[in-house]
Image (spheres, rainbow, N blue to C red):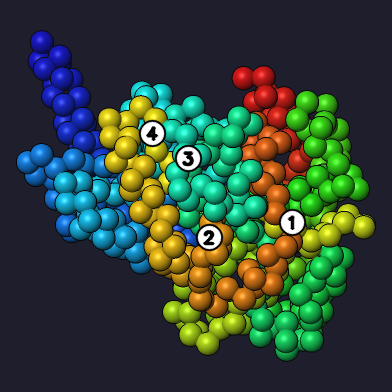
């Protein structure tokens, strides 16, 4: 009996400790990496409710819950500021923001399973494939006709249903240190061979003081992102178009080996930071600011962190280089920050009203200038250090992220982890291909 009593007390004590830990531990506020390898450093956030100042629920006030993937604190405040303006015009409506950070995707999956979604939520690249059946049709909203030509097909399904307002459009290519390229008389490369030649020149001319490419094995989305970006260039190019076989399951995965080989070669030649396996994404902005890193694959979402260390830093943007002879440059992209309305929400009309408010040109300009990304609507004015680049490359092709179209759900993690193993030397390029094939078939058949 005494033994049973002590066992029960031990269980109660254990549960109490666990509950204390869960309730008091905030989600990570250092570095978050989304499922595209787009990583940002943010202030600590929790899943706690953030209500707009003029929207404290009381009496008959209706409350809209909004979930967003935005992690940067200044951009969160910008979003809440726009919502506060909305509540001034609609005093009967309260707007409650939540920014779950790295837990966003898992939280939304649980909510989908329970069919209990927020009134308005960010589709973060999965408007049609993952969230389509939960979203209201927004095709008749006044802003829908103004969607950009590159974003319209990304959030419009085969029946013409518009799934979400795209506040910020992703265009991922190569971010570069303009001062380094100028110092070594290098033009932004247009082909992969030119990129490798630039890397060799930077490495040699700087006597290894400048690392051509920064990647992180800890925040492994940077490594997975390389494969995802260049898979489009390599396999969806008109010269080698494997789109059909990737979609129908007959793709020859031996073709993945040359792509894996290129990543391994970059590492062996010393083009990637030597501490790649232990480096963190948060290490990169300071190194970039100090002129020790030349290229970063992806969008310059790290810019504000760089300016903390060097306010005069010059960051350039270029489309992704071509990989196949005869092909041209491209961006990978689609939705970055969006607002979709839960079709079964109790306040659908009010949710659409809130989304329409965010879609106003003045508000879309605020979002573009804060996020430093092109807007998903046409003729939205923006003025920030990357505006001219987006204008310069506005006619460059934008392909959807490779894994979102051609790979089953779960393959992003496979690319990231196997890419790290490749750089660690524990798998070969051929083994990388074999792993991609086995996981592709397994996940495809689930």
Give left or right: position of 36 versus 17: right
Give the label, 3 or 2, closer to the camera: 3
Q: CA distance from mark 2 to mark 1?
A: 16 Å
- Depth check: 126 or 59 in front? 59
Residue at the location (20% across, 24% down)?
Answer: 11
Give left or right: position of 358 versus 414: left
The answer to which of marks 2 and 1 sits earlier in the sequence is 2
Quarter occupied by residue 346: top left
User: Label 4 near label 3: C-beta < 8 Å?
Assistant: no
The answer to which of marks 3 and 2 sits earlier in the sequence is 3
Q: Position of residue 285 (x, y in %)?
A: 53, 72
Secondary structure of the residue carrying numbered label 4: loop
Residue that mark 4 sits on: 342
Q: CA distance from mark 4 to mark 1?
A: 31 Å
The answer to which of marks 3 and 1 sits earlier in the sequence is 3
Residue that mark 1 sits on: 397
Res. 101 mark: none
Secondary structure of the residue carrying numbered label 2: loop
- Depth check: 84 or 70 in front? 84
Give the label, 3 or 4, closer to the camera: 3
Which quarter of the rendering shows the C terminus?
top right
Q: Position of residue 340 (x, y in %)?
A: 43, 41
Residue that mark 2 sits on: 375
- Number of other residues with Cα within 10 Å of mark 1, as a class: few under 14, some 14 to 19, many 20 or more: some
Q: Position of residue 33 (x, y in %)?
A: 51, 53
Q: Is residue 253 above or below residue 360?
A: above
- Number of other residues with Cα within 10 Å of mark 4, as a class: few under 14, some 14 to 19, many 20 or more: many
The answer to which of marks 2 and 4 sits earlier in the sequence is 4
């Amino acid at each position: 009996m005494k033994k049973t009593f002590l066992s029960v007390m031990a269980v109660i004590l254990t549960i109490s400790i666990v509950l204390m830990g869960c309730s008091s531990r905030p989600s990570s506020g250092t570095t978050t990496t989304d499922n595209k390898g787009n990583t940002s450093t943010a202030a600590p956030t929790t899943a706690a409710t953030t209500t707009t100042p003029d929207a404290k629920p009381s009496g008959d006030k209706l409350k809209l819950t909004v979930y967003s993937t935005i992690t940067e604190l200044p951009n969160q405040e910008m979003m809440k500021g726009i919502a506060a303006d909305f509540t001034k015009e609609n005093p009967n409506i309260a707007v409650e923001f939540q920014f779950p950070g790295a837990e966003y995707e898992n939280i939304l999956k649980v909510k989908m399973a329970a069919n209990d979604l927020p009134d308005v939520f960010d589709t973060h690249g999965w408007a049609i494939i993952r969230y389509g059946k939960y979203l209201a049709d927004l095709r008749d909203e006044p802003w829908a006709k103004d969607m950009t030509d590159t974003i319209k097909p990304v959030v419009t399904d085969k029946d013409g249903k518009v799934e979400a307002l795209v506040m910020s459009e992703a265009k991922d290519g190569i971010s570069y240190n303009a001062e380094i390229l100028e110092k070594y008389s290098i033009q932004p490369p247009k082909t992969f061979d030119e990129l490798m030649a630039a890397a060799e020149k930077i490495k040699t001319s700087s006597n290894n003081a400048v690392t051509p490419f920064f990647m992180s094995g800890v925040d492994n989305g940077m490594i997975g992102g390389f494969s995802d970006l260049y898979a489009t260039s390599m396999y969806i190019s008109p010269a080698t178009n494997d789109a059909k076989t990737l979609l129908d399951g007959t793709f020859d995965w031996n073709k993945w080996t040359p792509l894996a080989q290129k990543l391994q070669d970059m590492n062996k030649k010393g083009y990637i930071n030597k501490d790649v396996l232990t480096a963190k994404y948060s290490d990169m902005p300071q190194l970039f600011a100090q002129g020790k890193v030349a290229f970063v694959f992806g969008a310059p979402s790290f810019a504000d962190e760089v300016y903390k260390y060097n306010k005069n830093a010059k960051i350039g943007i270029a489309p992704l280089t071509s990989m196949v002879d005869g092909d041209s440059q491209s961006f990978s992209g689609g939705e970055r920050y969006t607002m979709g309305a839960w079709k079964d929400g109790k306040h659908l009309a009010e949710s659409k009203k809130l989304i329409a408010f965010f879609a106003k040109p003045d508000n879309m300009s605020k979002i573009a200038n804060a996020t430093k990304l092109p807007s998903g609507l046409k003729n939205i004015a923006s003025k920030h250090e990357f505006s001219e680049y987006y204008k310069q490359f506005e006619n460059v092709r934008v392909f959807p992220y490779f894994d979102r179209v051609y790979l089953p759900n779960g393959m992003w993690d496979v690319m990231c982890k196997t890419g790290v193993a490749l750089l660690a030397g524990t798998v070969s390029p051929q083994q990388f291909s074999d792993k991609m094939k086995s996981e592709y078939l397994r996940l495809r058949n689930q």
